[in-house]
Image (spheres, rainbow, N blue to C red):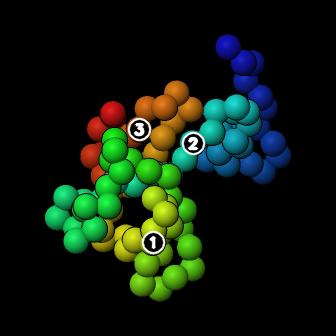
Amino acid sequence: MRPLEPLLPGETRSEYLDRLERAEVGKPQQLVARIKRGSKYAYQAPKGGWFDVRVVPDIGYGLRGNNNNYRFADVVFGVRLHDGTIVELASGKRG
């Protein structure tokens, strides 16, 4: 267990917690997505469903991943934790 670090002068509790989370070296998190079953792109879903995505400056299709671009409305978002577990952002379900 790491010893607690002191609050910096003028730092809020929220800023302090953000700083501690960023200091967790070697424990990256990745934004992931899963194509919704009702989407016209559902046939493009990879095996396992989840794939890494990044937000891009495109008005119509602002997500890039799975070798394609997608609309926000066509996917469900999740976060892949350092241990490989994925937490679905809409529901909090772990998979």
Q: Is residue 16 above or below residue 46?
A: above
x, y percentage for residue 84?
Answer: 49, 31
Q: What's the amino acid at mark 3?
A: Ile
Going by the picture, which residue comes out furthest to the top? 1
Q: Looking at the image, is mark 3 or mark 1 nearer the viewer?
A: 1
Give the x, y percent position of residue 90. Answer: 30, 52
Going by the image, does 40 lie left or right of 31?
A: left
Q: Quadrant of the N terminus?
A: top right
How packed mark 2 is, by other alpha carbons closer than 10 Å (few <14, some 14-19, many 20 or more), is some
Q: Where 86 sits versus 54, above or below?
A: above
Residue tagged by mark 1? 69
Quarter of the image that includes the C terminus: top left
**Label 3 CA crowd tier, 10 Å (few <14, some 14–19, many 20+):** many
> Regarding mark 3 in the picture, which secondary structure is present there?
strand
Q: Mark 3 points at which residue?
A: 86
In which quarter of the view is residue 73 placed? bottom left
In this view of the protein, can residue 22 be seen by the observer? yes
Residue 64 in picture, x, y percent from top left = 50, 67
Count how many numbered circles sit on residues in the image.
Answer: 3
Disc marking residue 43: none
Return the disc, 2 or 1, that comes first in the chain's sequence: 2
Identify the amino acid type marked 1. Answer: Asn
Q: Residue 22 vs residue 66: left or right?
A: right
The residue pinned by badge 2 equals: 29
Left or right side of 65 for 72 = left
Q: Residue at x 28, y 68 (%)?
A: 41
Between residue 22 and residue 74, name the one nearer to us. 74
- Please state the horizontal and vertical placement of residue 46, each as a whole percent of the image: 36, 51
Label 1 element class = strand
